[in-house]
């Protein structure tokens, strides 16, 4: 089993920045991708960004391209989401997820392709 814990959420003003982190523990021997999803009130959970190995490929949702950056530590069990130029539409609970089974790269966009999920961390962008 794998446990994922997100941290770094909070409240910021429009135009501000936050850095989210996700730490994995437990049976961490198999790690093929780590992703970030978010869910705003009244909306479905949506893909934000992911990193997939080998090659550390990093797809992003169109809504965050150029503003958000996903990265990992050297052991791949810690991932970060640097969020810049935040706006109120970014307000949501952000969830970290992990693929512990290798799946086709095209599935990285879909929630059902991930095997483990964190509890989420709240990000609020408001003046």
Image (cartoon, helix red, strand yellow):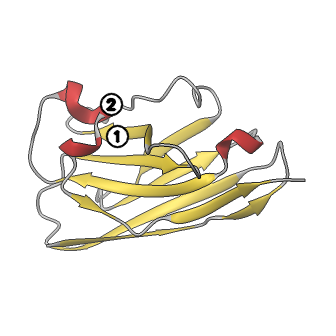
Residue 51 circle label:
1
Say few, some or many: other residues with alpha carbon within 10 Å of mark 2 (under 14 / 14 to 19 / 20 or more): few
Q: Can you give x and y, in whole percent of width and height, for residue 107 in the image?
A: 21, 31
Look at 49% across and 54% down and name the residue there: 80
Q: Earlier in the sequence, mark 1 or mark 2?
A: 1
Q: Decide which of 102, 114 is in the foreground and name it.
A: 114
Look at 56% across and 48% down and name the residue there: 42
Quadrant where the N terminus is found in the figure: bottom left
Residue 107 circle label:
none
Say few, some or many: other residues with alpha carbon within 10 Å of mark 1 (under 14 / 14 to 19 / 20 or more): many
Name the side, left or right, on which 38 lies relative to 63.
Answer: left
In the rendered image, is residue 86 in sight?
no
**Residue occupying the far bottom of the picture:** 26
**Residue occupying the far front of the picture:** 42
Q: In this view, does 54 lie above or below 112?
A: above
Look at 59% across and 27% down and name the residue there: 63
Residue 57 circle label:
2
Residue 110, quarter of the rendered image: top left
Q: In this view, does 46 lie above or below 105?
A: below
Residue 109, quarter of the rendered image: top left
Name the side, left or right, on which 53 lies relative to 7.
Answer: left
Q: Can you give x and y, in whole percent of width and height, for residue 77 in the image?
A: 30, 62
**Residue occupying the far right of the picture:** 127
- Give SS at disc 2: loop
Look at 42% across and 63% down and name the residue there: 22
Distance (Cα) linking label 1 and label 2: 5 Å
Contact, CB < 8 Å: mark 1 with mark 2?
A: yes
């Amino acid at each position: 089993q794998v446990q994922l814990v997100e941290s770094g959420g909070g409240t910021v003003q429009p135009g501000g920045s936050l850095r989210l982190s996700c730490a994995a523990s437990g049976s961490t021997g198999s790690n093929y991708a780590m992703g970030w999803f978010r869910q705003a009130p009244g909306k479905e959970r949506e893909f934000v960004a992911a990193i997939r190995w080998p090659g550390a490929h990093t797809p992003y949702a169109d809504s965050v391209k150029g503003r958000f950056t996903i990265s990992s530590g050297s052991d791949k069990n810690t991932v970060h989401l640097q969020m810049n130029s935040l706006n109120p539409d970014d307000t949501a609970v952000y969830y970290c997820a992990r693929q512990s089974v290798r799946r086709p790269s095209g599935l990285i966009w879909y929630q059902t392709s991930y095997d483990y999920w964190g509890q989420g961390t709240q990000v609020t962008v408001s003046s």
